[in-house]
Image (cartoon, rainbow, N blue to C red):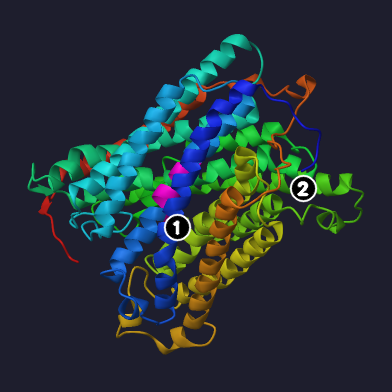
């Protein structure tokens, strides 16, 4: 990595074990979720691996483990570990309470264990959206609730740490990495109120038999209060890395911190009043409020555009600083030999296309063409499966060596892994988008279906789903193998530093309003209440409770 080594206070090392614990659990979750991924990929190609290798009781049990393990557990534990590390090193002070930090970790770990046991026991085959009237075992709901509560405690520790830093640094702007980390957890804490209410007041009492019936549409709407903002909970830590770490890895400096802060604030405000665009086809919700949420969804897209421009300009400056000339020649001198760089940049490239396909999902009328088709699966894999996961993989390629003091076991293998994951994702997601336009449904066991259309089965259709998905599966194994061997078998000392961008005090002159919290949080809460309270009140006034059912 480029740049002069930065010397940090030794006391910051207190966060290393905590970060390592979170990353370890995250990788175990990724491993569990990676097992059914090849089943899912081959099912999309018409190959029923569930019958040939009956590890799972059903297609839907595998799909539940894949979804919950990847998008709820791998991401959440990684984020808590990575951003705890980032806060400490950005503010150059330890967390306010390591006792609280470890208590938080254990609470979340207990929640994870309860959730995974319920899934593996086939008592919670309700997919990651857990829509009623499908009813899971109480352990599933209680476990996920504990994980959410843990994230709130992470924010509490962050706020305590930030307040202590602020008391000793009056007048200084918040370091951008800490600013982005706080934005991530503030946004998520507000957003998670929806699923918390759903769990505590609907699903947990219902699963325990304390109430006999609940309203599916109300529960579904509370889920999507949280369900779309959680995408930004996954994405924003990646953006933190793109803004504050990738520039140093590339050998440059962030093009504009002001633009970065504006993007973070847009993400904060407009990530929340958007969830109803997932419910365009749901009855019982006013079309007017669906349209309001559609409008806000298009606004939040501008934060992604700002990020794309800012990071691209940053990389261009880094390439030109290495002597490049011409319109595109700056791309070649970038550190393509560095796995931490390659993995994150490839993730960003795929996110561009994920954002474009997301515009179709958000469009009121176009959504009707792709709703509940494989298009949605392709979109989701470009955003979470590609942008987030590839970026997190890239982060671990420097973070794990830094935490362990051991050099990455194989840089060449890491590069092969990043490029193979990228190629597999391109094949997999592009094909799913096309199959979605041809009407192939999502969440359906295609390998056992009687309604498979001939146009789905062409050589550029279903077979490519299996090929792309299998490449990603193998790439995931290579990634996990490299990380495990780094920890257990690498004998070379790590020569890596924390790649946080450095700024001279004269460069910290950002508009004061972009470093204030109260006005932006007030605007966020107000806009969220305006967009969500009326439809939720309407749903409360017209509830139609139904009893639970086990359909697996």
Residue 77 lies in magenta, yes or no?
yes
- Classed neighbour count for the residue bearing mark 2: other residues with Cα under 10 Å, few (<14), some (14–19), many (≥20): many
The residues tagged by marks 1 and 2 sit, at their Cα atoms, a distance apart of: 32 Å
Q: Secondary structure at mark 1?
A: helix
Mark toward the start of the polypeptide (1 vs 2): 1
| Region of the chain picked out in magenta, as a range | 70-78
Q: Is residue 177 above or below residue 372?
A: above
Report the residue at 48% width, 51% height from top.
Answer: 27
In which quadrant is the C terminus drawn?
A: bottom left
Q: Compare residues 121 and 220 and report the one nearer the observer.
A: 121
Q: Secondary structure at mark 2?
A: helix
Q: In the rendering, which numbered label is found on residue 315?
A: 2
Give the mark toward the camera: 1 or 2: 1
**Position of 258 compared to 102: left or right?**
right
Tell me where residue 122 sits by quadrant. bottom left
**Position of 465 compared to 8: left or right?**
left
Report the residue at 8% width, 41% height from top.
Answer: 210
Report the residue at 81% width, 37% height from top.
Answer: 3
Q: Compare residues 368 and 550 and report the one nearer the observer.
A: 550
**Position of 409 compared to 458: left or right?**
right
């Amino acid at each position: 990595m480029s740049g002069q080594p930065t010397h940090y206070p030794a006391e910051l090392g207190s966060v290393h074990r905590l970060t390592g614990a979170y990353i370890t659990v995250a990788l175990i979750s990724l491993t569990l979720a990676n097992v059914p991924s090849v089943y899912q990929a081959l099912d999309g190609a018409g190959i029923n691996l569930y019958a040939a290798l009956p590890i799972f009781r059903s297609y839907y049990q595998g799909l539940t483990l894949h979804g919950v393990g990847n998008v709820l557990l791998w991401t959440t534990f990684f984020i808590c570990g990575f951003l705890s590390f980032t806060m400490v090193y950005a503010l150059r002070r330890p967390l306010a309470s390591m006792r609280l930090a470890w208590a938080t970790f254990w609470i979340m770990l207990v929640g994870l264990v309860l959730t995974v046991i319920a899934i593996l026991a086939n008592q919670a085959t309700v997919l990651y959206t857990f829509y009623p009237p499908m009813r899971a075992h109480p352990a599933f709901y209680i476990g996920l609730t504990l994980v959410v509560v843990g994230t709130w405690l992470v924010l509490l520790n962050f706020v305590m740490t930030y307040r202590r830093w602020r008391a000793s640094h009056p007048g200084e702007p918040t370091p951008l990495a800490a600013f982005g980390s706080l934005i991530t957890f503030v946004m998520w804490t507000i957003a998670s109120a929806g699923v918390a209410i759903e769990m505590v007041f609907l699903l947990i009492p219902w699963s325990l038999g304390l109430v006999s019936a609940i309203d599916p549409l109300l529960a579904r709407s509370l889920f999507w209060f949280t369900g779309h903002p959680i995408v930004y909970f996954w994405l924003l830590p990646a953006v933190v890395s793109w803004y504050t770490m990738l520039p140093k890895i590339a050998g440059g400096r962030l093009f504009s911190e002001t633009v970065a802060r504006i993007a973070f604030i847009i993400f904060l405000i407009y990530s929340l009043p958007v969830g109803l665009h997932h419910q365009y086809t749901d009855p019982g919700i006013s079309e007017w409020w669906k349209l309001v949420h559609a409008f806000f969804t298009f606004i939040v897209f501008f934060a992604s555009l700002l990020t794309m421009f800012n990071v691209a300009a940053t990389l261009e400056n880094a390439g030109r600083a290495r002597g490049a000339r011409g319109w595109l020649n700056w791309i070649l001198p970038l550190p393509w030999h560095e796995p931490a760089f390659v993995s994150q940049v490839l993730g960003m490239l795929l996110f561009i296309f994920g954002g474009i396909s997301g515009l179709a999902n958000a469009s009121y009328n176009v959504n009707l063409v792709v709703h509940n088709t494989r298009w949605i699966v392709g979109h989701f894999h470009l955003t979470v499966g590609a942008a987030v996961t590839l970026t997190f993989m890239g982060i671990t390629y420097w973070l794990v060596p830094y935490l362990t003091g051991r050099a990455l076991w194989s840089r060449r293998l890491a590069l092969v892994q990043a490029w193979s994951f990228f190629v597999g994702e391109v094949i997999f997601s592009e094909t799913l988008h096309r199959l979605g336009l041809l009407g192939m449904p999502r969440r359906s066991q295609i390998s056992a279906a009687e309604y498979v259309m001939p146009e789905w089965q062409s050589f550029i259709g279903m077979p490519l789903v299996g090929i792309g998905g299998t490449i990603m599966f193998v790439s995931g194994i290579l990634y996990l193998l490299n990380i495990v061997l780094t920890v257990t078998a690498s004998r070379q000392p790590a020569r890596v530093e924390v790649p946080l961008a450095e700024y001279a005090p004269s460069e910290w002159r950002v508009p004061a309003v972009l470093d204030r919290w109260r006005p932006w949080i007030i605007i966020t809460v107000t806009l969220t209440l305006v967009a969500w309270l009326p439809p939720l009140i309407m749903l409360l006034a017209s509830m139609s409770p139904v009893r639970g059912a086990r359909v697996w």
